[in-house]
Amino acid sequence: MQLTIAGGSPRAILYGAYELAEQLGVRFYLHGDVVPDEKIPFNIPSLNISKKPVFERRGIQPFHDFPEGPDWWSEQDYKSVVAQLAKMKMNFVGFHTYPERENFNGTGYKAEPLVWIGKEEDIEDGGRVKAAYPVLHFHTNDSTWGYRATPTSQFALGATQLFETDNYGADYMKEISNWPHTEDENKKIFEEVGVLFREVLEYARQLGFTTCVGTETPLVVPEQMAARYRINKPSDEQIKELYKGIFSRIGQTYPLDYYWLWTPEIWTWSEVSDEVVQKTQKDIQLANEVLDEMGNPFGLATCGWVLGPPKDRAQFDSVLPKSIPFSCINRALGYAPVEPGFQAIEGREKWAIPWMEDDPDMITAQLWVGRLRKDAQDAFRYGCNGLLGIHWRTRIIGPNVSALAKAAWECDGWQAENSRDLSTADFYKDWTKSQFGIESAELVEIFTALDSKGNLLAEGHKGDAPLNATEWVMGPGALCLKGADSSRLARYDFIAQLEAIAPGISGEGNKERYNYWLNSFRFNRATVATALAYRQLDSLINVAAKANGEVQFELVQQQVLPKRTELAKKWTEMTNLMLAKVTTNGELGNLANLEMHSKNKLGYLTGLDGKIEKMSGTKLPEDANLAMDFRGTDRVLVFTNPSVLQSDDEFHIRVRVLSNASQISGVLKWKPLAGSSYQEIPLRHMARNVFEVLLPASSFGEDFEYYIEVNADEKSLVYPATAKSINCSTLVL
């Protein structure tokens, strides 16, 4: 039998090849591929499939700000995500850049380095700059978004093993001095981020992607640059000079298809004066004038937390050129549907951006398949030609990413449903089978029950959903004190069903994936249990504080101190569950969130200790503290597996080991794809339990497969779980 894969372009043929792989049982996600454990005879299938996308632009908008997201990605991470997007038949990637703001108070953002704001006179060859201002992407020595700066060597329960430096972040942030850094350091950050994104966006362009970066409107002039250029209240001409500098540097730094201007977040829930709206409109027009004068090296687009001003979300459509695409994320962290104002806009590109996860629940599992399907259907009904998903993490939102990618090709044929979410049973029937290797109506029922079902608290504000377990307190993913009660704990009674199904899962890959999701739901439950223990401790302390003498002493000894010890045990269980499931940069960021945000900034472990010690007259017992050593099952972790390399790319991965072994060493074993004999190269120790391995392009030259073997004292560990049977593979273009 002969099977032909045909398409109207090279990219279409590539999509056809990936479609065939999916027909054979393979599934693609941002974090990597899922290849079935069970091998099947290779027969050319009888297929007659014809597809075309519903949306011209299909992709993601990874959001810079938190450690869970692209702030901690390396060049290899970005490229890997782009390669995975292509496998999912997506073709767009866009990035937002926070500008400077006045009076930083420990919450919120600081200026970010993807977009430099300055004049053309300060640009040197290759996009280097003569002048800079303080910028960062998240690192553990700084305090944005309600995190408290904490050296990773102080992370408890062995988490420190996974970080090779005390000040952890992207490589260009690791050796940085304290905020606001030196000017030379800030210039270097801009330079290194520029070089990184040149490589990433050139790679994306070669794979046929539309690329987009930008910052907020009206233009915010950094204080140091305003002083340098003697700008007080910028005139139109001064704004145009700055936009020319921004666009000129981009032209020298990285390839780009669109520069998007984001209206401020406050527009989603507050009134906005006509003066501010007019200033914003004028700013966009000035930016467009500059691009016109420069010969339009790339396009201009708009975006934001809303489509337009509160009085009329489609207002800018009547005043801005039709060449400018309009886009926005859904309001209320995605709990609100796609902006209906898209319907009133005609004759221009329109990109809807649903939420694949929200940041109040940043550290826990979220399932939004039904909601994303509905968002895709609405975007199609409103005439949008772009469907993009905002997110931070990768693996834990696998179902959501997959649902959005598939919807971008299928939603025009779906039945309309009069609800916020579309049905999901068909999705989870396929997903559970491909993930876990079994057909289980019970599993489908469990995941379908957990999916979506979010409600709005008020206009522009999210409400509750079945899996909600954390909240926004000064920053993302804080333990949810106000919602921690027995009824929320009871939402996780389904875990007993998952535990009962677990023994029936066979195959090392299936088991690893099943345990990942089982531990993810256990972690959700543990965050609620920990928050509840803290609330109970706080209540007991308040009761004891009102008592006197021996009564107070008895209350502290018999109730407060035991509850404080219980809280430490809950923290231990919660952190150990995260360590049991950490497999990506996003979960590494979750560990930092627990330590720097809920524990050290919000004080949800030790914040009440002063009151306890004052009433007891003594220090807390030792078992009220968290252990520093690792107490779980030894594991080998590789957060990013480069599945597609260009012919001149080197192969570089970092290997992290969770183990208390005194002697750890390892090798990478590799061979040509489907070859017979392995070569090996030792892992190079970086620091703590972090290693790396580098293969120059001249070493392989063709597609290859590999696995990692680690010796931890007397124990032998491998990565991936299916090593030797199903290895990691890398294609060389």
Image (cartoon, rainbow, N blue to C red):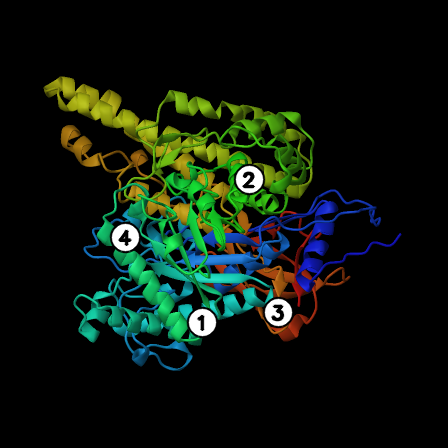
- Identified at 46% across, 24% down, the residue is 491
Pick whichever, 617 or 604, lies toward us.
604
Return the mark for residue 277: 4
Return the mark for residue 646: 3
Q: Counting residues from the N terminus, which is met first, the one under dot 3 or under dot 2?
A: 2
Return the mark for residue 377: 2
Q: Counting residues from the N terminus, which is met first, the one under dot 4 or under dot 2?
A: 4
Q: Counting residues from the N terminus, which is met first, the one under dot 3 or under dot 4?
A: 4
Q: Amino acid at mark 4?
A: Val
- Which residue lies most toward the right here? 1
Q: Counting residues from the N terminus, which is met first, the one under dot 1 or under dot 3?
A: 1
Nearer the observer: mark 3 or 2; the answer is: 2
Tell me if I can see residue 481 in this picture.
yes
Q: CA distance from mark 4 to mark 1?
A: 25 Å
Quadrant of the snapshot with the C terminus:
bottom right
Pick whichever, 680 or 142, lies toward us.
142
Place residue 283 in its image quadrant: bottom left
Q: CA distance from mark 4 to mark 2?
A: 30 Å
Report whether 232 appears left or right of 191. left
- Residue 307 drawn at (x, y percent): 39, 48
> Mark 1 — residue?
296
| SS category of the residue bearing label 2 | helix
Pick whichever, 626 or 304, lies toward us.
304
Q: Amino acid at mark 2?
A: Gln
Pointers 4 and 2 in contact (C-beta within 8 Å): no
Q: CA distance from mark 1 to mark 2?
A: 33 Å
